[in-house]
Amino acid sequence: MNPRSMAAMAMCLGTLICATGCGDGRAAGMIITGDGRMMANTGENTRDEAVRTIVSQLAPRLAPHWRITAAIAELPEYIEDPRGEVGGDWRWRHATVAIGLIGDTQAPLPVSAADIESAVTDYLRPKVIRAQDHLSVVVHSVESAASQSPAPASTGARTYTIAAGDTLADISAAFYGTSQHWRRIAEANPGLDPGQLVPGTSIVIPPAR
């Protein structure tokens, strides 16, 4: 990824910590994201914003025949400023990133999996403590778009065919823009074991609320 693209990714996730309110009890203030949204200053929101940034910056390079999903398994920790000043930063001690590529297998992938892995690694490296040992990026799930068929229009739901390596968190991130709604998908699919997703299984993706 060129320096301008990487700078855009950094700006999108770059946050301003305000002095009003508090986050999860450890980090004071609110997060103001690159697009102007305000969120509680928590590890969950920091992770979701990182996922949104990765997807939003790489998706245009894959369009129109391919799309990308992303999920980060671990939550970051809030690291206080060692100088004792106000503020700190969210950083990962370990970060395991799953990148899924879904698209028309008849169309060539416009960006190689290696380039995508490199771009995500470069973006997250400053946010991971000892990234050379504790950052893992896996690109997987090349699947035909033909398998992504809509459910009956009356329900407003869609269907998705599980690919190898998928988790409900990254499926949630792909359809809702956040990994936090994975339970909604699980509830819409009775009998589905979130810990043992079987590739080739068709599941219902309920509409956004």
Image (tube, rainbow, N blue to C red):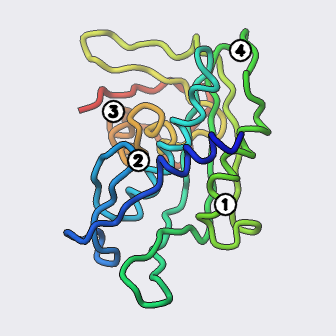
The relative height of residue 72 versus residue 192 in the rendered view (above or below) is below
Q: Which residue is mark 3?
A: 188
Q: Report the disc number at residue 125.
A: 1
Q: Is residue 62 left or right of residue 18?
A: right
- Between disc 4 and disc 3, the foreground one is 4
Q: Is residue 2 left or right of residue 180?
A: right
Question: Are circles 2 and 4 on residues that touch, CB within 8 Å?
Answer: no
The span from disc 2 to disc 1 (Cα, nearest Å) is 19 Å
The span from disc 2 to disc 3 (Cα, nearest Å) is 33 Å
- Between disc 1 and disc 4, the foreground one is 1
Crowd class of label 4 (few under 14; some 14 to 19; many from 20; radius 10 Å): some
Seen from the viewer's position, the closer of residues 206 and 40 is: 40
Q: Which residue is mark 4?
A: 105
The span from disc 3 to disc 1 (Cα, nearest Å) is 36 Å
Q: Amino acid at mark 2?
A: Gly
Q: Is residue 67 left or right of residue 117?
A: left
Seen from the viewer's position, the closer of residues 141 and 113 is: 113
Q: Is residue 150 left or right of residue 69?
A: left
The span from disc 2 to disc 4 (Cα, nearest Å) is 34 Å
Question: Are circles 3 and 1 on residues that touch, CB within 8 Å?
Answer: no
Quadrant for residue 22, please give it.
Answer: bottom left
Q: Secondary structure at mark 2?
A: loop
Seen from the viewer's position, the closer of residues 196 and 75 is: 75
Q: Secondary structure at mark 4?
A: loop
